Image (spheres, rainbow, N blue to C red):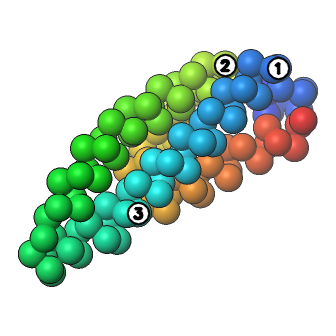
């Protein structure tokens, strides 16, 4: 059973992992928004792929970190595999990482 299901206070390790995950989710979310809302229009409408060439690899690198942070939180809070996969995929769709971050952290925040 997960910490959020039992309503027990999360351990300090889960709280620390949650903080790291929240930062990672916001960084990846903002990077993806810059890529999709600024870089892609500039590339395909304006003919300038500079932003995509710079932000794209950075987002990819940061997404790998997001995956590690998600796996760490999932392991520490004993999530089912399906939940961890869905949260990990949230970093690939614009705005969804923000929604997932709020949904995932609400029960843990309420338990503290």
**Vertical placement of residue 68 versus 24, above or below:** above
Q: Quadrant of the N terminus?
A: top right
- Front disc: 1 or 3: 3
Residue ranking furthest to the left? 47
Q: Kindly state the secondary structure of the residue where label 3 is placed.
A: helix
Q: Which residue is mark 1?
A: 11
Q: CA distance from mark 2 to mark 3?
A: 29 Å
> Residue at left 47%, top 57%?
30
Asked whether the viewer can see residue 90, the reply is no
Position of 2 compared to 66: left or right?
right
Q: Position of residue 59 (x, y in %)?
A: 34, 46
Position of 55 compared to 31: left or right?
left
Q: Earlier in the sequence, mark 2 or mark 3?
A: 3
Q: How many marks?
A: 3
> Residue at left 50%, top 48%?
27
Given residues 63 and 82, the one toward you in this image is: 63
Q: CA distance from mark 1 to mark 3?
A: 33 Å
Asked whether the viewer can see residue 22, the reply is yes
Position of 59 compared to 96: left or right?
left
Q: Earlier in the sequence, mark 1 or mark 3?
A: 1
Residues at circles 2 and 1 in contact by the CB criterion of under 8 Å: yes
Q: CA distance from mark 2 to mark 1?
A: 9 Å
Q: Which residue is mark 3?
A: 33
Q: Kindly state the secondary structure of the residue where label 2 is placed.
A: helix
Q: Which residue is mark 2?
A: 76
- Front disc: 2 or 3: 3
Q: Kindly state the secondary structure of the residue where label 1 is placed.
A: loop
């Amino acid at each position: 059973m997960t910490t959020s299901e039992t309503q027990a206070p999360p351990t300090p390790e889960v709280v620390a992992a949650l903080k790291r995950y929240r930062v990672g989710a916001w960084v990846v979310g903002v990077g993806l928004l810059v890529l999709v809302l600024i870089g892609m229009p500039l590339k395909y409408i304006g003919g300038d792929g500079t932003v995509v060439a710079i932000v794209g690899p950075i987002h990819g690198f940061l997404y790998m970190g997001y995956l590690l942070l998600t796996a760490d939180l999932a392991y520490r809070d004993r999530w089912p595999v399906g939940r961890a996969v869905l949260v990990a995929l949230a970093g690939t769709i614009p705005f969804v990482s923000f929604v997932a971050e709020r949904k995932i952290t609400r029960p843990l925040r309420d338990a503290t």
